[in-house]
Image (cartoon, rainbow, N blue to C red):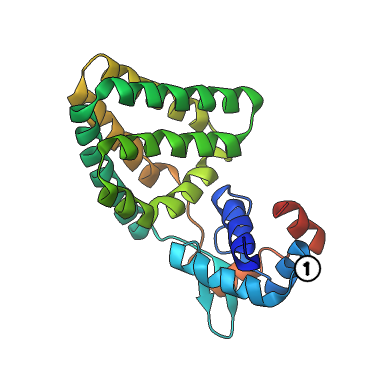
Amino acid sequence: MSLTQEACERLRDAIVSGKFEFGERLSEEQIARALGMSKAPVRAAFTDLRDMGLVSIVPQAGTYVFTPTPQEVNEMSHFRAMLEREALGGALARDPDSLVQGLSAAIVQMKHAIDVGEFALYSRADSAYHRVILHHAGNRYLEKAYDLTATALEALRAHLQSGEGDFWQRSFAEHTQMRDLMANRQFDEAQALLEEHILVINRAISLPSANINQRTKSRRRTDEEYAILLS
C-alpha cells in the first residue's frame, strides 16, 4: 500500500465513522504529522477523497469534510433506494434462501455491535447487510452505480448512529424485519420496507450551515486529537 493509499484509507475511515464533523476543515500539515509522512501523499489523498464525495477542496481556503445539502441527501437517498429495490428484486428472483442466509450473518454482526456499544462496528455491519443485497443481485453494474453514493451515505448514517435517540434499535429492527419478510416470501412488503428504511434519512438527519467560513471557526483540533482520530 502506498502512502497516498494509506492516508486516503485512514481519512476515509475517520470521515465515514463520523469522527470528523460535517464541514470541518482538515489540516494537511497536522494530518501528515499524525500519519508520520510528508504532506504530498496527504494532498493526493484529499483528491481521492474529493472524488469519493467525502471532502470539498476550496482553492486558497483549504479542504473540508463534505457538507451535504438537504437536496443532495434527498437525491442520493432516492438514487440508492432505486438501485437497492432493483437489486433486491434480482436477488429474490435468483436465490432468496441464499440471500436470507447472507443477511442473517450481517444481522448477527449488527447485534454484536449493539451489545458492545460500538457504532463503528454497527456501521460496517449495516453496510455489509446492504452489500449482500447488491452482491446477490448478480449485476456488477448495479454495484458500480451503488458505489457512487455509498461512501457519503455511510458517513451520513454514522452521524445518525452516534447521535441521541434510538436510531440503532430502530435500524436493527428494520433490518431484521426485512430479512424475516424475505424468509416468509413476502417480497413486495420487503421491498417497500427497504425503500422506507433508506429514505428515512431525509427526515432524521440535521445538517449544518453550508457557509464554509462560518464552519471553519467551529473546530480547531490539536495534533493529539488528529493522532487519536486517525489511529
Residue at the (45%, 54%) spot, across then down:
152
Whether residue 135 is situated above or below residue 57 in the rendered picture: above
Q: Where is residue 98 in the image (x, y as percent from the top left)?
A: 32, 23
Q: Is residue 51 left or right of residue 96?
A: right
Q: Locate residue 65, reporting x and y percent.
A: 55, 63
Q: Extreme bottom residue here? A: 60
Residue 149's place in the image compared with 3, above or below, is: above
Q: Which residue lies furthest to the top in this view?
A: 184
Quadrant occupied by the N terminus = bottom right
Question: Is residue 155 visible to the viewer in this orientation of the structure?
Answer: yes
* Secondary structure state at the residue bearing disc 1: helix
For badge 1, the amino acid type reads: Arg
Of 171 and 85, the residue lying toward us: 85
Nearer to us in this view, 226 or 166: 226
Residue beneath the point at 43% across and 42% down? 204
Query: Relative to residue 59, is residue 111 depicted above or below?
Result: above
Residue 111 in picture, x, y percent from top left:
53, 22
**Quick one: label 1, few (<14), some, or many (20+) residues within 10 Å?**
some
Count of numbered labels shown in the rendering: 1
Query: Of residues 146 and 66, which is closer to you in this image?
Result: 146
Q: In this view, does 158 lie to the left or right of 87?
A: right
Q: Quadrant of residue 201?
A: top left
Q: Where is residue 134 in the image (x, y as percent from the top left)?
A: 32, 40
Q: What residue does disc 1 label?
A: 33
Q: Is residue 222 visible?
A: no
Q: Quadrant of residue 128?
A: top left
Task: Give the residue displayed 65% in from the left and 66% down from the top.
Answer: 3
Residue that appears at 25% across and 34% down? 88
Q: In which quarter of the image is residue 81?
A: top left
Residue found at the very far front of the displayed protein: 1
